[in-house]
Image (spheres, rainbow, N blue to C red):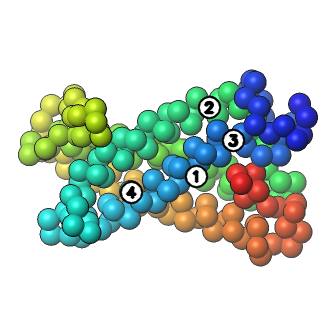
Amino acid sequence: MNATRTDDLSGPGRGSAVQRYSLTMRILHWVRAVLIIGLLAVGIAMTNSEDGSVLGFDGYHYHKEFGILVLLLALVHLVVRARSNIPDLPPGLAQWEVVMAKVVKRAIMVLVIVVPVMGYSMSSSFTQSDGVPFFFFGELPEVLPKNDKAFEVFDWLHMVLAYALLGLVVLHILGALKHRFLDKGKEDVDVLSRML
């Protein structure tokens, strides 16, 4: 594959001469990044608000809708990733940085699926739930039986895993910025260029 043709989705592959992620992967990455950071911010704001409102809006309603959207985009991302040529990490990274980058990225991928599932399970099991809206599709089915004890478990898991996701996202951002702006020999360690 020609190194300059980075948007080809012709088949699976890892590394080879690919310098950047495909255009589809890059768009999915940045859209999900904005949504995830927004959801984390709204989640913190609404849980610290007496009525769950954020800037005058029903925080819970929009948090549920966009949470489901992030879950669906995460599933799309996995399919696109499986069909894409994935660029190698830059050659100048230390072995521990390579391991750390892979662990953090995979943990984020898992949590971006698990956190919304816990949120959906929370809403589905809560006896006082007002449903799970999803934009113009209306209410999604709540498939779990109503059980406030189960709700408390899902609530706790959703919160703890969301904070874990926040920590990993911060670590991911700081790592990318460190390699791009602070490390010596930046061209050999710059991971951000693969996603721009």
Residue matched to label 1 = 30
Label 2 Cα neighbours within 10 Å, binned few <14 / some 14-19 / many ≥20: some
The relative height of residue 124 versus residue 43 in the rendered view (above or below) is: above
Q: Does 114 sit above or below residue 40?
A: above
Most distant residue in the bottom direction = 182
Question: Which of labels 2 and 3 is toward the front?
Answer: 3
Residue 164 seen anywhere in this rendered image of the structure: no
User: Which quadrant of the rendered structure holds the N terminus?
Assistant: top right
Residue 132 shows up from this direction: yes
Coordinates of residue 128 in the picture (x, y in percent): 8, 46
Disc 3 marks which residue?
A: 23
Q: Say which quadrant the C terminus sits in.
A: bottom right
User: Would you identify the image quadrant in which residue 142 lies?
Assistant: top left
* Amino acid type, residue under disc 2 in the picture: Val
**Tag 2 or tag 4, which sits nearer the N-term?**
4
Q: Nearer the viewer, mark 4 or mark 3?
A: 3
Marks 4/2 in contact by CB < 8 Å: the verdict is no
Q: Which mark is residue 80?
A: 2
- Mark 4 burial class by Cα count in 10 Å: few <14, some 14-19, many 20+: many
* Horizontal and vertical percent position of residue 89: 79, 50
